[in-house]
Image: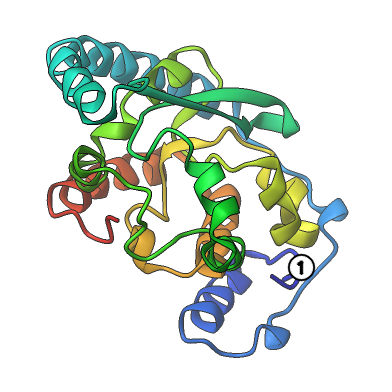
């Protein structure tokens, strides 16, 4: 992904139109990201953290009920671990371990190594259409987003937040170019603009732009709107794998 520079609030509309309508990104007005002074009010940070803790506690309490059943179904399919964990990039570039219910075969990375053509697509798009590594129960978990719920533990621990950019791997930072530092000014989120804008039906470049747009426009009201819009997106499985 080429560097898009740092947009101002007017440029946000230009970026969205240029990326989502496949127009030339060279027409986007850019500026030097080091000059950008990222700032969040203390009131917003406190309110956001309180919301994170309350929702995470409620969500984890509710997860206790279906977890044994889901865990048993995952284990019975291939007799491997029910959880998937991986290192992701957090606030200010700090690495943390993210937790999910496992939706793929046990050695998913090894599967890509054995299939170079799929690995090439993965590196280019960050997703595979009809990914053969996803298990039967995994497809259900992804369609309903139930696989993401263990990340509420990350939210409770303060490594993630309810609403924010996607939790990405270190290898993906290069795709953001000059915007990589901007993206790391906030915690990654359980949901965000990407999740309510088509999820897997969007291109990788579109997802990168949506992540950065959130960082620039984040506010408590924006977070509440995204959380509300996440509900129908999940229930209708829009853009789910």
- Height in image: 192 above or below 204? above
- The one nearer the camera, 117 or 161, is 117
Query: What residue is at 27 percent from the left and 14 percent from the top?
Result: 60
Camera sees residue 122: yes
Query: In which quadrant of the rendered image does the N terminus lie?
Result: bottom right
Query: What residue is at 19 percent from the left and 10 percent from the top?
Result: 64
The colour scheme of the drawn protein is rainbow
* Image spot of residue 209 (x, y percent): 57, 63
- Height in image: 10 above or below 165? below
Q: Quadrant of residue 4?
A: bottom right
Query: In which quadrant of the rendered image does the C terminus lie?
Result: bottom left
Q: Is residue 187 left or right of residue 52?
A: right
State how many labels appear. Answer: 1
- Height in image: 159 above or below 208? above
- The one nearer the camera, 163 or 46, is 163
* Image spot of residue 13 (x, y percent): 52, 74
* Image spot of residue 18 (x, y percent): 55, 83
* Image spot of residue 49 (x, y percent): 47, 20
User: Under tag 1, what secondary structure?
Assistant: loop
Mark 1: few/some/many CA within 10 Å (<14, 14-19, 20+):
some
- The one nearer the camera, 187 or 60, is 60
Residue where numbered disc 1 is placed: 5
Query: What residue is at 38 percent from the left and 22 percent from the top?
Result: 83
Query: What residue is at 85 percent from the left and 63 percent from the top?
Result: 32
Q: Which residue lies furthest to the front in this view?
A: 114
Camera sees residue 165: no
Q: In this view, does 159 lie to the left or right of 92?
A: left
Q: In which quarter of the image is residue 184?
A: top right
- The one nearer the camera, 76 or 240, is 76
């Amino acid at each position: 992904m080429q560097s898009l520079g740092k947009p101002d609030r007017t440029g946000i509309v230009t970026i969205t139109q240029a990326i989502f309508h496949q127009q030339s990104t060279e027409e986007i007005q850019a500026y030097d990201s080091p000059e950008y002074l990222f700032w969040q009010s203390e009131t917003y940070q406190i309110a956001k953290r309180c919301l994170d803790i309350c929702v995470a506690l409620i969500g984890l309490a509710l997860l206790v009920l279906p977890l044994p059943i889901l865990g048993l179904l995952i284990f019975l399919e291939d007799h491997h671990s029910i959880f998937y964990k991986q290192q992701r990039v957090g606030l200010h570039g700090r690495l943390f371990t993210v937790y999910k219910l496992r939706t793929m075969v046990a050695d998913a990375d090894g599967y890509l190594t054995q299939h170079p053509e799929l690995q090439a697509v993965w590196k280019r798009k960050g997703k595979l259409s009809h990914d053969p590594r996803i298990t039967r129960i995994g497809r259900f978990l992804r369609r309903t987003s139930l696989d993401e719920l263990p990340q509420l533990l990350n939210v409770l621990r303060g490594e993630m937040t309810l609403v924010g950019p996607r939790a990405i791997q270190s290898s993906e930072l290069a795709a953001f170019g000059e915007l990589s530092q901007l993206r790391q000014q906030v915690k990654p989120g359980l949901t965000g603009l990407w999740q309510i804008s088509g999820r897997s039906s969007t291109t990788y470049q579109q997802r990168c732009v949506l992540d950065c747009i959130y960082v620039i426009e984040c506010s408590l009201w924006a977070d509440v709107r995204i959380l509300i819009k996440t509900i129908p997106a999940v229930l209708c499985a829009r853009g789910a794998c």
